[in-house]
Amino acid sequence: DIQMTQSPSSLSASVGDRVTITCRASQDIKNYLVWFRQKPGRAPESLIYSATSLQSGVPSRFSGSGSGTDFTLTISSLRPEDFATYYCQQYIGFPVTFGGGTKVDIK
Amino acid sequence: QVHLQESGRGLIKPSETLSLTCTISGGSLNTYYWSWIRQPAGKGLEWIGRINTSGNSNSNPSLRSRVTMSVDVSNNQFSLKLSSATAADTAMYYCAREFYDTNYHLYVDYWGQGTLVTVSS
């Protein structure tokens, strides 16, 4: 299985901060990567697919970059609703696999 | 907007079969694949498997021998059965929708809220 490693596992930030989360794949996954946000007690929400494409309805403060093995999710200006846990997922390999998550909390 | 809701028994005994159903509202089962994903407390997400309305399915090799999935188009539902449950199957179970990207690869675009299943005697 393809291993997905996220860093950091947690971070503290303030409203308005620029936040960057990274995801590394154990082998080349081209651009077959999704980013999710999960607020406590809520369903995960897809933010980015194909590494860089914004899911319909997702605010433009979210952006994704990368290809191959190294990927980044950037939140340009953190909003209160963005304090949550973020996951990456690769979908080229079988089975699909997920990163361990990055929890973003309030500084 | 499509909404997915899991339902099923929250507590089962070891060796019993875990059974869950996902009901879709605000959209059709057709065109998509429908999947199950789980997360034990404090651990990572694990993809269980997917199925479409034609009955085509894939499941994680680590669980394949115990997984049965089905689709009920008339009720806009799909289901998971996981046989011979053990404590290791205790987890939050999510249903999800998978959609094709521009390169015809499936990715998860919508999730249910999840339901907790505990396996304990």
Image: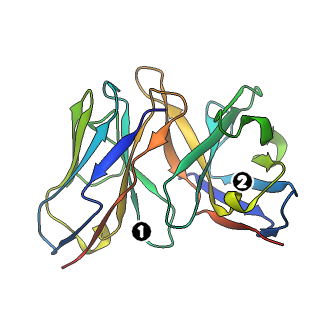
Q: Amino acid at mark 2?
A: Cys
Q: Residue at x 84, y 51 (%)?
A: B84
> Which is nearer the eye, B2 or A103?
A103
Q: The C terminus of chain B lies in which quarter of the figure?
A: bottom right
User: On the picture, is B5 further left or further right than B79?
Assistant: left
User: On the picture, is A93 further left or further right than A79?
Assistant: right
Q: x and y percent of residue A38 in the render? A: 42, 62
Residue B70 visible somewhere in the drawing:
no
Q: Residue at x 35, y 68 (%)?
A: A84
Residue under numbered circle 1 = A39
Q: Is residue B86 above or below residue B99?
A: below
At mark 2, the secondary structure is strand
Q: Residue at x 45, y 72 (%)?
A: A40
Q: x and y percent of residue B49 in the render? A: 65, 38
**Residue B16, which numbered label?**
none
Q: x and y percent of residue B104 in the render? A: 47, 21
Quadrant in the rendering for residue A67: top left
Determine the chain carrying the residue at label 2: B
User: On the picture, is B34 further left or further right than B75?
Assistant: left
Residue under numbered circle 2 = B22
> Which is nearer the eye, A26 or B31?
A26
At mark 1, the secondary structure is loop
